[in-house]
Amino acid sequence: TAMDPNSHPHGGGEGRSPIGMPGPKSPWGKPTLGYKTRRNKATDKWIVRRRGKKRR
């Protein structure tokens, strides 16, 4: 983007430079573009602990 690094996580660089980090970020530094940011309120109360890794 045409911003300086102070104004946006993707800012700075020479010319039209790529994002330059593992994943895209919002202006506030949170992951964006496909990253789920909202929790599922409907099923959260039923989940007590994580499902363990499958044994092989």
Image (cartoon, grey):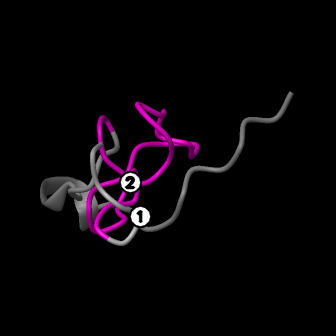
Above-or-below relation of 25 to 48: above
At label 2, which amino acid type do we have? Answer: Gly
**In the rendered image, which residue does mark 2 sit on?**
11
Residue drawn 56% across the image and 43% down it: 20
46 in the magenta segment: no
Q: Secondary structure at mark 2?
A: loop
**Circle 1 Cα neighbour tier, 10 Å, few/some/many (<14 / 14–19 / ≥20):** few
- The foreground one among 29 and 20 is 20
Q: Which secondary structure is most common in the magenta stretch? A: loop
Residue drawn 43% across the image and 68% down it: 48
Q: Residue 9 appears at what percent x and percent y?
A: 40, 59
**Circle 2 Cα neighbour tier, 10 Å, few/some/many (<14 / 14–19 / ≥20):** some
* Quadrant of the snapshot with the N terminus: top left
Question: Is residue 23 rendered to the left or right of residue 35?
Answer: right
* Quadrant of the snapshot with the C terminus: top right
Question: Is residue 28 rendered to the left or right of residue 25?
Answer: left
Above-or-below relation of 7 to 55: below
Q: Quadrant of residue 45?
A: bottom left
Residue drawn 13% across the image and 56% down it: 42
Q: Secondary structure at mark 1?
A: loop
Q: Residue 18 appears at what percent x and percent y?
A: 48, 33
* Contact, mark 2 vs mark 1 (Cβ under 8 Å): yes
- Residues drawn in magenta: 7-34
Q: Quadrant of residue 11?
A: bottom left
Gap between marks 2 and 1, in whole Å?
A: 4 Å
Q: Residue 39 appears at what percent x and percent y?
A: 23, 59
Residue drawn 44% across the image and 54% down it: 12
At label 1, which amino acid type do we have? Answer: Pro
